[in-house]
């Protein structure tokens, strides 16, 4: 799968992205998609990045390298992007990548309300941990704050991935 570059790359009106990955994304608009096409990435692996690595390893490596940042306060490395949802009209093409044997119908069933839980209700505590603190080198704890925005990455086969991205706001 290859990334389909958007005609209007993502750019936040006030905040800054944590890396040079905006060129691959558009702002995610829930109204542009059918919620029945949303599928959980957890059937591939419990870790979101490992999930997409199973079916899109080159994309995973590229986005991880572009979104990586170091928190000087915790001395930890994080990624400012978090893959969350697969959007596809053809879920059968991914069935060979499941970590446990299951039918696409079961995947559809467990993913049915994924947009209510994952998109509308926001991030889980684990998601927050994976995205990190938002602080980078030369950012004092009083310098600004971060927030989140949902972005969509589209592939040339028509499928898409929804990511959450950290956005940095200076005071």
Image: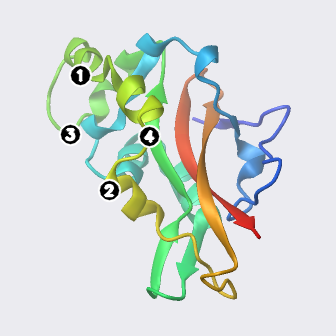
Cβ atoms at labels 3 and 4 below 8 Å apart: no
Quadrant of the rendered image containing residue 110: top left
Going 38% across and 64% down the picture, which residue do you hit?
129
Q: Residues within 10 Å of mark 1 (few under 14, many from 20)?
A: few
Residue 130 x, y percent position in the rendering: 40, 62
From the viewer's perspective, tell me whether residue 128 is left or right of residue 13.
left
Comes first in the chain, label 3 or label 2: 3
Is residue 167 found left or right of 71 in the rendered image?
right
* Circle 3 residues within 10 Å: few <14, some 14–19, many ≥20: some
Q: Is residue 85 above or below residue 124?
A: above
* 26 or 115, nearer to the observer: 115
Label 1 close to label 3 by CB (< 8 Å): no
Give the residue at mark 1: 110
Q: CA distance from mark 4 to mark 1?
A: 18 Å
Residue 126's tag is 2
Q: Element type at marker 1? A: helix
Residue at 70% x, 41% y is 25
> Circle 4 is placed at which residue position?
122
Kind of element beneath mark 3: loop
Residue at x 63% of width, y 37% of height: 153
Mark 3 vs mark 2, foreground winner is 2
Q: Mark 2: which secondary structure?
A: helix
Q: Position of residue 79 (x, y in %)?
A: 52, 64
């Amino acid at each position: 799968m290859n990334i389909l570059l958007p005609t209007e790359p993502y750019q936040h009106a006030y905040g800054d992205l944590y890396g040079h990955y905006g060129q691959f994304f558009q702002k995610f608009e829930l109204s542009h998609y059918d919620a029945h096409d949303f599928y959980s990435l957890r059937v591939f692996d419990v870790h979101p990045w490992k999930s997409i690595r199973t079916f899109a390893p080159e994309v995973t490596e590229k986005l991880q390298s572009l979104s990586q940042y170091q928190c000087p306060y915790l001395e930890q490395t994080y990624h400012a992007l978090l893959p969350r949802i697969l959007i596809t009209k053809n879920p059968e093409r991914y069935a060979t990548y499941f970590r446990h044997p299951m039918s696409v119908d079961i995947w559809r069933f467990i993913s049915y309300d994924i947009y209510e839980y994952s998109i509308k209700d926001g991030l889980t505590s684990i998601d927050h941990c994976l995205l990190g603190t938002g602080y980078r080198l030369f950012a004092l704890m009083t310098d600004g704050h971060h927030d989140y925005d949902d972005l969509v990455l589209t592939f040339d086969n028509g499928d898409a991935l929804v990511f959450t991205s950290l956005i940095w706001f200076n005071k």
